[in-house]
Amino acid sequence: MSDPHYHSIRFDASACHGCMACMRVCPTQAVRVRHGSAEMIEDRCIDCGECIKVCPKGAVVPLTASPAGLREFDYNIAIPSPALYTQFDGDVDPGVILQALRNSGFSGAATLSWAGGVVTEVLDLFLSDYRGPAPLISSFCPSVVRLVQIKYPELVDQLLPILSPREVAAREAKLTASAETGLPVDRIHAVYVTPCPAKLVSIVDHPGMEASYIDSAVAISDLFPLLAPAIREVQASGVDIPETESSAGLGWAFSVNLPSTLSEEHTLSVWGLPNVLRILDDIDKGRLHRYTFVECHACFEGCVSGALTVENPYVARSRALRLQHSLPKPDLTDLDEIRARHERGEFRTSVPFAVWPPRPLGRDIVTAIARMQERDRLAARLPGIDCGACGAPTCTTFAEDVVMGHAGEAECVFVHQDQLRDRLARLAGGAAESGPAGPGSAEGGR
Amino acid sequence: MTDAEFVHAYEIAGSDFTNAGRASTSIKETLKEMGLASALVRRVAIAAYEAEMNTVMYARRGTMTLHVTPADVTIDVRDEGPGIPDIPLAMQEGYSTATPEMRELGFGAGMGLPNIKRNADDLTITSDVGRGTILVMTVHVS
């Protein structure tokens, strides 16, 4: 079932030493540090994995499946994110990596080769006669989808209603495997080899779909130690490699994928969550309606820089660029068939995207007004320097936490200092000397 | 309970294009946090943004004040600037006094005030030429 509180990461309190790196980097202010360790505010987290990237203690744990656990299925197919092909030294052909996956416990391995080309084609077809609210926002990055669902619910109808290449690839791969093995489709387990935790959310939460065609996800970082030796073995064996990824499939992991039928003045390509937040804010203000399509990626360098990759993202990107030149174009000889399937809606999302605005300050408007007044009054007493010592990322979020009863005002070191000074002054009986330094002056502490 | 009112004022600096739009973003965030319906928040956000940009583009400085009551969201924008000599003309779609620089930034289509009018339930504009403009827009909560 779709669940806004499902998350693909967990904070391990025993490993966390409360350094606040994750709290400071979180783009949606979903982390607080309480009692010396990091905690997640579930209705704000978008599973982007920025916290994983910065945690020095490995205390942010992705909930991806362990590679060892995959053996229990009758037939499991690995569907690698094209980011996987950029992780190995020496420009390894994707076909070799697919073979290494088959030698490492997967019954089969399938690419985004065809699906990547199909989705590009379908995007062209869909956008060339789209007349709804503009711009449409790409829905292939699950963190972007969650960001819209949580922070910009009014834009949810502008999420692109087209299936992602990974979902299309999983559906086709299962049908092919079923035909080859005689097993029913539901006994075939599709495993996404993922560069980030967010893809796990799109599997469990399946926004826009009744269910995901993918069944589980394994982290690239978990498979890497198994695959590196398996790749060397395949290379040494000299076996014939029957298939490889296409340039179109690979492109989804790192490059701009804008529809060719729209001119550049009607499209935007946006990379990195701070930039995605700015663009969504502008769309929300009605500024960008002359654009038809905005492609948004949570990670600055695309999927090759996902939180569960191992290679330096710039090195990975450089490899991807070299690889793209050597890979074949996707085989779309069945273009008429693809168009017919598009007409039948086979590449469209099947249910509306849900909206999950975070809990408001109050259940009713009168309570919300009162709490907002209180928050403003408290914020005015705080120093406004966002030092984070209280365990909240900004003074405003701290004020909100206090108003909602999740934190005490004295957890702010500046407020605490003022309170101590007042108490000392009273104890000394020197009220006449201490003057009117009432509780309204955290500034005095600076 | 009718006296429940949240008030927050934002200072807007004329010609400060770096920070332009921050006040309306903050207003939008505040209304969302208060749990107001997203369609309503969007109307307020679009109108507030247009009003904020008018202040940034034409005035020396201004103050934008958000008022929220259980019945209404009101935004009151007072600026010190050239004022609007002919308000009915300024309200016409396509009429604009934007400079080439403003047009370069994507403004000047003459849609600012009409866009505010379209998104607000009530709009009043009073102007003192050479001194400034007062714009008050209201969106009803229900």
Image (cartoon, helix red, strand yellow):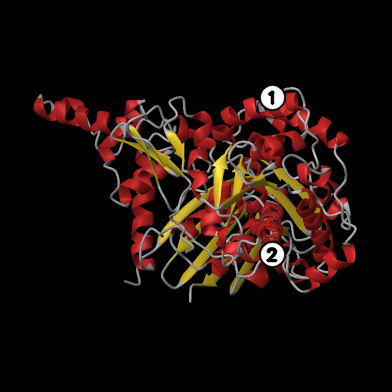
Q: Which mark is residue A232?
A: 1
Q: Residue at x 53, y 42 (%)?
A: A27
**Crowd around label 2: few <14 · some 14–19 · many ≥20 (10 Å):** many
Classify mark 1: helix, strand or loop: helix
Q: At label 2, which amino acid type do we have?
A: Pro
Mark 2 or 1 closer to N-term? 2
Circles 2 and 1 on the same subunit: yes
Q: Quadrant of the C terminus of chain A?
A: top left
Up the image or down, B5 lies above or below A244; here it is below
Up the image or down, A171 lies above or below A237; here it is below
Percent x, y of residue A352: 60, 69
For label 2, the residue is A161
Task: From the viewer's perspective, tell me whether residue B50 is left or right of residue A223.
Answer: right
Q: Residue at x 74, y 56 (%)?
A: A288
What is the chain letter for disc 2?
A
Q: At label 1, which amino acid type do we have?
A: Arg
What is the chain letter for disc 1?
A
Distance between mark 2 and mark 1 Cα atoms: 41 Å
